[in-house]
Amino acid sequence: MNRWWTTIPLAVAATVPVCASPSLAIAAIEAVAVLLCMLGTAVALTAPVTAGCVVAVIGYAVALQSGSAELDVIGGGIFGLALLFLLDLSEFTRRFRGAKIANDVLQSQLVYWLERAAIISGIVIVLALAGFIMSSLVPPSGRTIISGLGALLAFAGAIYGASTRAR
């Protein structure tokens, strides 16, 4: 299995924050993320790739926090999908490092990744539309409450996802 396929989602994940807020600090943070991910891919370790993804998320958060960047739902979705594919590809190549993989196995894995990307993209679009509708229907004072409820639901979903994977 060719481990260098991970460079495609890595390049996307590093480019989105830099495009959101082009600055030297963001570029430096993303460069550290790229180096960590490439190190993890080269030596077939999951920890450096995961650390690189965390640094990339920090860089994206810093880019969004800067005054020049605006929140872009599509950019955030692309960024999240790139990180997901980066983690999946690096883990897949780590597991099957040096192995000859049958074409039907690769095809079924590719279909699985593409189906998951389509489902996630659909969810991003539905949530973006729902957010637009809610912002036009809810008065400004109620938006903070709805945002807090959304954050709580996201936190609960993350805890649920982590607990079901641990089994």
Image: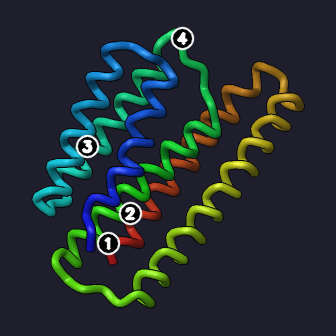
Q: Which residue is mark 3?
A: 52
Q: Earlier in the sequence, mark 4 or mark 2?
A: 4
**Could you say which disc has been placed on residue 166 in the image?**
1
Please name the amino acid that badge 2 sits on: Ala
What residue sits 32% from the left and 14% below the top?
Answer: 24
Element under label 2? Answer: helix
What residue sits 64% from the left and 39% below the top?
Answer: 74
What residue sits 73% from the left and 27% below the top?
Answer: 143
Q: How many marks?
A: 4
From the top left corner, tell me how far across and down residue 124 is, in percent: 66, 49
Element under label 3? Answer: helix
Please name the amino acid that badge 3 sits on: Gly
Whole-Å distance between the Cαs marked 3 and 4? Answer: 24 Å
Question: In the displayed structure, would residue 47 be above or below residue 165?
Answer: above
Q: Which residue is mark 4?
A: 68
Element under label 4? Answer: loop
Q: Which residue is mark 2?
A: 162
Please name the amino acid that badge 1 sits on: Ala
Whole-Å distance between the Cαs marked 4 and 2? Answer: 34 Å
